[in-house]
Amino acid sequence: MRVNLKYRKVAAIGAGMTPFRRRFLETPQELAWEASRKALEEANLELKDIDCVVIGSAPDAFDGVHMKGEYLAHGSGGTGRPVSRVFVGGATGVMTAISAWYHVASGMCKKVLAVAEEKMSPGRPHPQAVFRYIWDPITEKPLNPNLIWIFAMEMHRYMHVNNVSKEEIALVSVKNKRNASVNPYAQLGGEITVDDVLRSEVLVWPVQLLDVSPVSDGAAAMVMVDGDVARRYTDTPVWIEGVGWTLDNTTWPNRELAYPRYLENAARMAYKMAGVERPQKEVDVVEPYDPFDYKELHHLEGLLLARKGEAPALLKEGFFDKDGDIPSSPSGGLLGVGNPIAAAGLMKVISIYWQLKGTADKMQVKRPVHTGVAQAWGDLMQASTVIVMRN
Amino acid sequence: MTLHPLKDEELKTHFTITYKPEAKYSYTAGQAISNFLKGLKEGKILGRKCPKCGKVYVPPRMYCEECFCPTSSWTQVSDEGVVMTAVASFISWTRDRLEEPEIVGTIRLFPSTSRDYVYPGLFHRICCSYEEVKNMKIFGRRVKARWRPTEKRVGSIDDIECFEVI
């Protein structure tokens, strides 16, 4: 049963993306423009039809430009319109879609363009160095941390508490890169084996090179409109039925890391709004955030699509395969498509949108789909954003 | 528009502008952490206690984030605890290769119990072998802070060299 009907209905009617690649010559604005133009084209709209623009981008330091909202605005169709930029760390991409949703759901705007962009390649010698500044400057930074440390810590805790092996986790990387091999936007699609993952360079044990998503540049955009106008432009609108976003305790050294409570809270918020009571029975396709392979399993549990510690076993059975019960990351996810942070999150929403619209082409999952979920996660280990869509 | 993916060397044949920002910061430690750092200099790990819910914050905080009231008293916690997670890093913060792995993790400090979801704890180096990380034997082990000699302590998280198994 759906519990809250006070909002205006919101539909997605168009989406566009640039390919995700390691280095592009194009500027961030040019990438944003490319994605925006494609989204407007798919929606059969022109820029003059758009009421307001939402921009999503992760830390400014990656592109190396402050005020990224303003910087990206003209490439995102923002000139002369209400524009806002959202930022919730790695969870920004899905938050961009959620923000577009509330602009329309509130009744303030009829047609919104949501644009997410990230260019991780400019930082030298490696974008990893930029991540240093997300740590606490006094109690953590003096230890010279790099970003992979915390995820390795979370992964190892997850493995320890749930007795999960590296082999079981590597299957995520194998699945996602395989799914990405038919995705025209993907940077790292292909056939790899569990052995390839286990033999790749050890970065921070237990994290190895093929456990991690690549450094990428890219942009993604979506058009969201009021329910009343959606059918004027398309016969196949995809409805945004539930949204949720929450933060957990931000001092991660002071709490249990084996289970993503932050995500369970966000998922429950979104499911309640969408009237999803038994997620594992009702969700047909899912795009959980997978910058690391263990993260997909961790998030499938947080999304209540698997019991605590049981996602690896379900994955092994093929439950989350493209032709399985709940196909997970049919796009190829961040591991396969690439990880331009904010754009990667919005890419997840777009993937579900295309699945529900039935236009995912070679990425289309076998079984008929009605309810889809996209999710992103960010900050150190505490922010999560969830969106539930139906056709 | 054609989108061009490139190798790093290929990028040099196109117009690119290189710039290094010279930004330096002086972060203040604030009320709670200043005293925490002073405590470290004296070989103590200090926390703040919430008068309402009784939660002890380490690193300390002047307010309780849940009750949203001021924490009322300083309390010293043990420099002993349990390893919650540990990892071995073969890359530096700039992603250069390290020959010897650096081992870090999180430590749940006493007093606390294994049933606590939130507890006083620190992120720090752990003095143990790569093997103990790899086979997970270090998980759940009791560890104690190895302090730097008194004259070398400056009031920094670095005054603790690492946590080692006792």
Image (cartoon, rainbow, N blue to C red):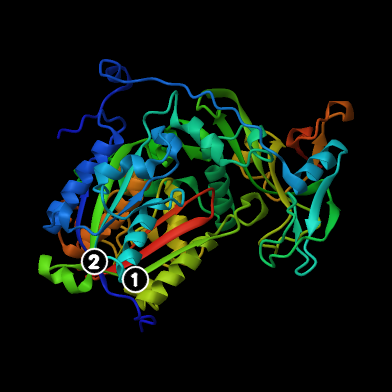
| Left or right relative to B128: residue A228 | left
Give the crowd class for mark 1: few <14, some 14-19, many >=20 residues within 10 Å: some
Residue A245, numbered circle: none
> Does residue A190 show up?
no
Q: Is A314 in front, or is A387? A: A387
Which quadrant is home to the C terminus of chain A?
Answer: bottom left
Count of numbered marks: 2
Report x, y in % for residue A94.
36, 56
Q: Is B138 in front, or is A53? A: A53
Report x, y in % for residue B156.
76, 35
Identify the residue at horizontal 44%, vertical 31% (top origin). A127
The amino acid pointed to by label 2 is Lys
Report x, y in % for residue A168.
44, 50
Q: Which residue is mark 2?
A: A110
Estimate the spatial distance between the alpha carbons at disc 2 and disc 1, rounded to whole Å.
Answer: 10 Å
Give the crowd class for mark 2: few <14, some 14-19, many >=20 residues within 10 Å: many
Q: Which residue is mark 1?
A: A106
Secondary element at tag 1: loop
The amino acid pointed to by label 1 is Ser
Which quadrant is home to the N terminus of chain A?
Answer: bottom left
Q: Chain of mark 2?
A: A
The answer to whether residue B14 is above or below residue A220 is above
| Left or right relative to A244: residue B50 | right
| Left or right relative to A390: residue B68 | right
Identify the residue at horizontal 57%, vertical 33% (top origin). B89
Identify the residue at horizontal 76%, vertical 61% (top origin). B70
Secondary element at tag 2: loop
Q: Is A391 in front, or is A303? A: A391
Identify the residue at horizontal 56%, vertical 43% (top origin). A150
For this orientation, the residue located farthest to the top is B13
> Does residue A373 show up?
yes
Q: Chain of mark 1?
A: A
